[in-house]
Image: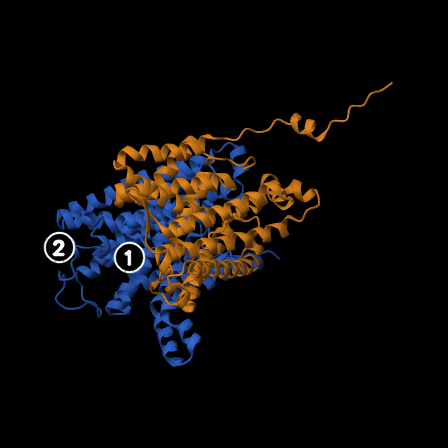
Chain colours: A blue, B orange
């Protein structure tokens, strides 16, 4: 049964399995275990990132294509929900319309980019997506009548998901049962479903072809698979999943702006999480997102403490200040690409494999 | 009795058919300028924009030429090229504050000396950092495209953050030297003085580069290496060493271009590298990866396009370059001047 749900792609390492179960239970029970707004916000961010990163893993880890436009699709999803809800009023209908319009837009755009640039070389695709994504970011902040410009859009959700909608008079196990809790669980189960679906995709015959293309596209073509078609499909699929992740984020924040979903910083976060978690393993997205978002949310406070401790020292205090968070991220990123290319999941699986071998 | 005919070098050269130079892309640049004329309407405005576009194109060419050669030689695409641009621009800010009295006077030669000194310092610094960049980051990942993209991107982030540590994360203004402010007026059209200086510097760099590439042995090796690396290696030349040289020179040129760009914009932000990077990627895709001539034409096209659309429809200016790229790729999928074996 479990085997079926996980598409026969079991963790294959006891520690990894334990970690995954811990993540699943932790996220499922966050509202009850860690009451408080910050903990819930962090958990919701983790959930959204898991979907976003897993969808990027389909592209980078399984197909071996680097795209810098992943946040663009993430942003399209978030803007879809935001614009539809802000314009048409907070109804389920406008929500559905926003999600489907975003999906269609992402489908067309990713198909177009894919057909254009995936015919040539992987490097071409990376450059073109970088250009398109930055143009899209400028466009989103300039079309202020439509997207709210730099300020973004704040909007309301349907009645059932609003924080002031109470379902129970008294708190249940320390958590008040309101619209906020309901939207958290909408996010949780949607993400769970999407990740399982992604597992299904990468472990299907289609997923195997993608991996073959990653390993050697020339041979894959020689066997008779049209690599362009498979690459484009992979690009489209990953864009659609990213769009859904964006919808989830907008649903949670009830706000969207260029910095929340489109900024290049998020793209870097996603790259880093994929590499740390382990490329080509959907589980890596889960582990990586949990580790990364927790570090991002709580380590920066630690850096603030450290920076105030070395206040007087000229260069050091500059380096430790929380504004330089990205610097350490960059160094970590380069080091992990060199020395840790298989990521957490890859490492753990390699250990199990070694133990079994003799 | 045997007669041996020894072919003179001239005859031997005549025996090899010389590849005709492809003029179509150049004509495209001209066509773009001519199409824009009626759209803009006023001739003087058109002239002003064209001059500005050509100057911008020259700066972009200086920056992008190194990147395209590096790619052509070793198949390395450096996503961290923007760091050198930013470094050059920030060196310019430091030089301009350090030698403020040279820029404040109205004496032309002192102003020009300041600009020249800035260029030299920016090139030296960017070149040195480029050498370290190649050594530390790029060398371990030769031949692995995926890792190259990731690593150089990581290098870009680190570089940008270090620049923020040194120069601060906020905008730094550059005071344009006194004698270079203002414009020349030709009839109704105006050309900014600094743009003329930038264009002249760009032309000098272009001339030096074309001379080195076409008339020296070094250039011959570089061009041969772009066409077929293994063949050059098998003839006994160390292409690795050549490559390091090209990488350093490319970084220095990026520093030079960054300095000019910074002075021209009169303000520098840490994001300048990432911003210009996008432009030069478009340029080298349009030109054909690895091609110097294509890089020049692409840069001029992008420069002109940016100025025309900036005037006609400012909101879609960024998309115009991408539209241009799409059109060029529809026409020639490998870029304007495709390099033979890629």
Dot 2: chain letter: A
Q: Establish whether labels 1 and 2 are both on one chain.
A: yes
* CA distance for labels 1 and 2: 24 Å
Mark 2: secondary structure = helix
Crowd class of label 1 (few under 14; some 14 to 19; many from 20; radius 10 Å)? some
> In the shown orientation, is residue B292 left or right of residue A313?
right
Q: Nearer the viewer, residue A55 or A205?
A: A55
Dot 1: chain letter: A
> Which residue is most to the right?
B1
Report the label total: 2
Instruction: Say which residue appears at 22% left-offset and 55% top-offset.
Output: A152
Mark 1: secondary structure = helix
In this view of the protein, can residue B16 be seen by the observer? yes
How far across and how far down the image is residue B189, in percent?
Answer: 30, 43
How far across and how far down the image is residue B224, in percent?
Answer: 62, 40
> In the shown orientation, is residue B106 left or right of residue A32?
right
The residue singled out by tag 2 in the image is A159
Image height of A210 relative to B10, above or below: below
Instruction: Say which residue appears at 27% left-offset and 63% top-offset.
Output: A41
> In the shown orientation, is residue A229 left or right of residue A179?
right
The residue singled out by tag 1 in the image is A260
In this view of the protein, can residue A4 be seen by the observer? no
Crowd class of label 2 (few under 14; some 14 to 19; many from 20; radius 10 Å)? few
Q: Nearer the viewer, mark 1 or mark 2?
A: 1
Task: In the rendered structure, find residue A26 and report the number of the disc placed on it.
Answer: none
How far across and how far down the image is residue A274, in percent?
Answer: 43, 55
Q: Nearer the viewer, residue B255 or A34?
A: B255
User: To which quarter of the image does residue A207 belong?
Assistant: top left
How far across and how far down the image is residue A335, in percent?
Answer: 50, 62
Instruction: Say which residue appears at 27% left-offset and 40% top-offset.
Output: A104
């Amino acid at each position: 049964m479990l085997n079926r749900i996980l598409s026969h792609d079991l963790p294959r390492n006891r520690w990894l399995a334990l970690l995954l179960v811990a993540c699943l239970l932790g996220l499922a029970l966050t509202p009850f275990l860690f009451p408080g707004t910050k903990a819930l916000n962090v958990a919701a961010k983790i959930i959204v990132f898991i979907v976003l990163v897993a969808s990027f893993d389909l592209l980078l880890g399984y197909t071996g294509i680097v795209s810098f436009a992943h946040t663009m699709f993430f942003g399209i999803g978030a803007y879809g929900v935001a614009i539809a809800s802000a314009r048409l009023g907070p109804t389920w209908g406008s929500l559905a319309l926003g999600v489907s319009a975003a999906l269609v837009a992402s489908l067309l755009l990713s198909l177009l980019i894919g057909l254009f640039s995936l015919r040539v070389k992987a490097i071409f695709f990376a450059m073109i997506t970088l250009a398109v994504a930055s143009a899209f970011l400028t466009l989103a902040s300039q079309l202020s009548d439509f997207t709210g410009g730099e300020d973004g859009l704040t909007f309301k959700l349907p009645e059932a998901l609003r924080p002031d909608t109470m379902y129970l008079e008294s708190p249940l196990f320390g958590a008040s049962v309101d619209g906020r809790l309901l939207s958290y669980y909408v996010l949780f189960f949607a993400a769970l479903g999407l990740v399982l679906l992604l597992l299904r995709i990468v472990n299907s015959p289609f997923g195997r072809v993608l991996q073959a293309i990653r390993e050697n596209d020339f041979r894959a073509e020689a066997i008779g698979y049209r690599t362009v078609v498979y690459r484009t499909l992979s690009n489209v699929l990953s864009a659609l999943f990213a769009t859904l992740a964006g919808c989830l984020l907008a649903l949670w924040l009830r706000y969207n702006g260029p910095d929340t979903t489109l900024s290049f910083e998020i793209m870097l976060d996603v790259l880093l999480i994929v590499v740390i978690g382990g490329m080509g393993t959907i589980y890596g997205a889960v582990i990586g997102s949990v580790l990364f978002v927790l570090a991002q949310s709580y380590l920066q406070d630690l850096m603030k403490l450290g920076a105030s401790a070395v206040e007087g020292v000229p260069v050091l205090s500059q380096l430790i200040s929380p504004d330089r968070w990205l610097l350490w991220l960059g160094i970590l990123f380069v080091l992990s690409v060199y020395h840790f290319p298989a990521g957490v999941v890859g490492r753990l699986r390699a250990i199990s494999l070694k133990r079994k071998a003799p | 009795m045997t007669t041996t005919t020894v072919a003179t070098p001239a005859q031997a050269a005549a025996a090899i058919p010389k590849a005709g130079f492809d003029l179509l892309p150049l004509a495209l640049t001209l066509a773009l300028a001519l199409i824009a004329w009626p759209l803009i309407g006023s001739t003087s405005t058109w002239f002003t924009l064209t001059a500005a576009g050509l100057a911008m194109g020259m700066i972009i060419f200086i920056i992008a030429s190194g990147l395209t050669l590096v790619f052509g030689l070793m198949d390395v695409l450096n996503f961290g090229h923007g760091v050198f641009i930013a470094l050059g621009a920030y060196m310019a800010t430091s030089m301009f504050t350090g030698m403020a009295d040279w820029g404040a006077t109205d004496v032309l030669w002192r102003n020009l000396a300041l600009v020249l000194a800035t260029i030299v310092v920016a090139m030296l610094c960017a070149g040195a950092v480029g050498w370290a960049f190649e050594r530390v980051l790029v060398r371990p990942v030769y031949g692995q495209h995926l890792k190259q993209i990731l690593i150089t991107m990581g290098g870009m982030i680190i570089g940008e953050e270090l620049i923020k540590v040194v120069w601060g994360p906020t905008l730094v203004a550059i005071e344009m030297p006194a004698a270079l402010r203002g414009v020349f007026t030709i009839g109704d059209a105006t050309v900014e003085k600094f743009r003329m200086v930038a264009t002249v510097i760009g032309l000098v760099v272009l001339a030096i580069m074309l001379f080195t590439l076409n008339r020296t042995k070094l250039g011959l090796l570089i061009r041969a290496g772009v066409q077929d690396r293994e063949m050059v290696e098998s003839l006994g030349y160390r292409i690795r060493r050549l490559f390091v040289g090209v990488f350093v020179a490319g970084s220095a040129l990026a520093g030079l271009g960054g300095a000019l760009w910074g002075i021209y914009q009169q303000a520098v932000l840490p994001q300048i590298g990432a911003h210009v990077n996008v432009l030069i990627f478009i340029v080298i895709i349009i030109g054909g990866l690895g091609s110097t001539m294509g890089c020049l034409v692409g840069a001029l096209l992008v420069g002109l396009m940016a100025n025309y659309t900036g005037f006609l429809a400012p909101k879609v200016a960024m998309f115009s370059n991408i539209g241009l790229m799409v059109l060029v790729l529809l026409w020639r999928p490998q870029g304007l001047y495709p390099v033979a074996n890629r």
